[in-house]
Amino acid sequence: MDPRRILIIQLRRVGDVLLTTPAITNLKKQFPQAKIDFLVEPPGRCVLDGNPDLDEILCYDRSRPIWWLRNIRRRRYDWVVDFLGNPRTMWITLASGAPLKAGFDFTGRGWVYHMKIPRPDRPCHIVQQKLDLLRRLGVNCEDAGLKIHLADKDRSFAEAFLRGQDLGERDAVIAIIPTHRRQTRRWTAQGFAEVADHFQRTYGFKALLFWGPGEESQMQAVAGAMQTKPLIIPLASLTEMAALLERCRAAVTNCNGPMHLAEAVGTPTLTIYGPTEPEVWNPGGPHHRAIQAAGVDCLGCNLNECPTQHECMRHLPAQRVWRELESMLDLPAAAGAGATQGA
């Protein structure tokens, strides 16, 4: 019997929530009459608001865990699909009493799920991992892009900011997104600065620096290292940030949440990878390229603290990055233009 009530669980983070939207699309296509709800922590809600395939977005409050266990139980879901699989979501899934509980087979937690799959033993994009879990449930999954709804007010915010900088629709803008909550996932501020300088000097692009709460120092490090003047976005909501990214020709970025926002609004991305694996996180294809340092043995270590000298990020020269972006945008390489120091 087809499920009538489905709960999807992906409490955090914003990028991971966005990466779950193809699963929402495929579930709704398979079960158009089903009520599909999504359990998420408050920061991730804004990237789900307006999603036409969801009936209800449930904002989880960590301060009321017992209330939430009872609330989920009362809703009598037929299916609960837990894409996060941490101890908290394991107990929520168990408490649901759903006839079918699905998740990943993490050590010590897989016993909760009726249907489970192991994490792949080789690199596999995270969206495909989620869709593989649905396929195990008999869902006919097709590739689907990330989905985010931008309201008129989001695009009005972006247009007002750009007009205030004397930028029109024909002005070329590239996004520079140098932030990450973990230092090991960040390329150097000097590297981002050199790429931004190169595109402003050589092609007349405007470099737009992105940042979020708690990330101002990371953004200022790039701005302070630049020899040309960047534009800096104001403090913005995630959907306002997405609307600004929608106006950019491309984004040069670390592997972070805003990279997935750029993908969701159709902006090409060039993402710099060190400890994380491009095969797992990068969308791929001609419009979403990955770049890594050459000759570094520890790439893809997935460590949160580097035990050596952060070679995976320090040994990637800015010139390699801007050459790759020139290729992406089909721009003529300007021989000898800009700085050529290693980043």
Image: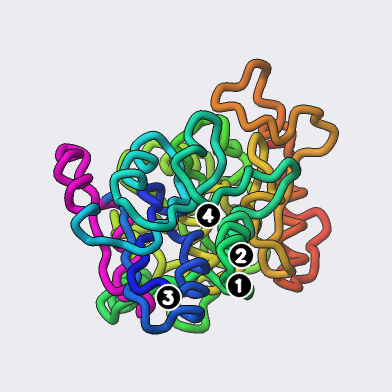
What's under tag 1, amino acid-wise? Cys
Asked if the residues shown at circle 2 and circle 1 are in contact, with their CB atoms under 8 angstroms apart, the answer is yes
Q: Residue drawn at (63%, 73%), measured in percent from left and top?
A: 143
Amino acid tagged 3: Leu
Q: Helix or strand or loop: what does disc 1 sit on?
A: loop
Whether residue 164 can be seen here = no
Q: Which residue is mark 2?
A: 135
* Quadrant including the N terminus: bottom left
Q: In the structure shown, which secondary structural element does the residue marked by tag 4 occupy? A: strand
Task: Tell me where residue 141 appears, x and y as whole percent.
Answer: 60, 72
Q: Of 249 and 118, which appears nearest the observer?
A: 118
Give the residue type at disc 4: Ile
Q: Of the residues under marks 3 and 4, which one precedes in the sequence?
A: 3
Instruction: Give the residue number, with chain letter if any, for mark 4.
Output: 176
Q: Residue at x 80, y 64 (%)?
A: 333
Residue at the top extreme of this rendering: 307
Q: Alpha-carbon distance for marks 3 and 2? A: 46 Å
Crowding around mark 2 (Cα neighbors within 10 Å: few <14, some 14 to 19, many 20+) is: some
Q: Closer to the observer: label 1 or label 4?
A: 1
> Which of the marked residues, 3 or 2, is nearer the chain's N terminus?
2
Horizontal side, residue 12 vs residue 170: left or right: left
- Pointers 3 and 4 in contact (CB under 8 A)? no
Looking at this view, is 14 or 86 the one in front?
86
Dot 3 crowding, Cα within 10 Å, few <14, some 14–19, many 20+: some
Quick one: quadrant of the C terminus? top right
Can you tell which mark lies on residue 167? 3
* Residues drawn in magenta: 42-71
